[in-house]
Image (cartoon, grey):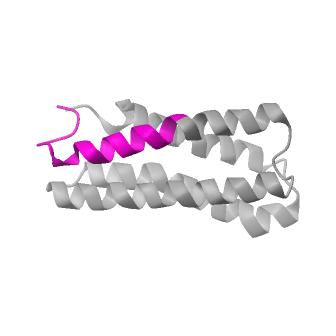
Amino acid sequence: MKDICELDVYRLAEALADKIWADFDGWSEKAQRTMGYQMIRAADSISANLAEGYGRYSPADRKNFYRYARGSFEETKAWLRKAIRRKVIQGQDEISKYKSLIDELGPKLNAFIRTTNMKRTGK
């Protein structure tokens, strides 16, 4: 079985969280305190829940944590939409980078959840 950090879905989740983490320092204090910390927690929670689920034995336990990861993914997207709408995240290049990560991670996350009924993901 592969390590969780070798899976594309996990790597994408980490890349999204790391981008938010890096961009956070350039935001105003207001944006950092009101949405920034919550956005970081939500984005970090995607990969954390994937990792926790990956370590569980039963398919039901794994699927539960993978669904939590999807919930955190949706929360992260909601915060990103607000940050763009409120002009915390600006510029077409920056917006495109986030969109690219989101567009790739979403389908991979859903596919990963669907594979949970198999014996062990990654075999």
Relative to 42, 49 lies left or right: left
Residue 17 is a magenta residue: no
Q: Which residue: 86% across, 37% down?
A: 91
21 versus 72 height, above or below: above
Q: Which residue: 64% across, 59% down?
A: 78
Relative to 45, 66 lies left or right: left
Q: Choose top left, top right, bottom left or bottom right for residue 93.
A: top right
Relative to 51, 11 lies left or right: right
Q: Main secondary structure of the magenta part?
A: helix
Q: Choose top left, top right, bottom left or bottom right for residue 70.
A: bottom left
Residue 114 is a magenta residue: yes
The quadrant of the image that shows the N terminus is top left
Q: Which residues are magenta?
A: 104-123
- Front one among 79 and 58: 79
Q: Residue 28: x and y, percent?
A: 88, 58
The quadrant of the image that shows the C terminus is top left
Instruction: Point out the residue furthest to the bottom here.
Output: 34
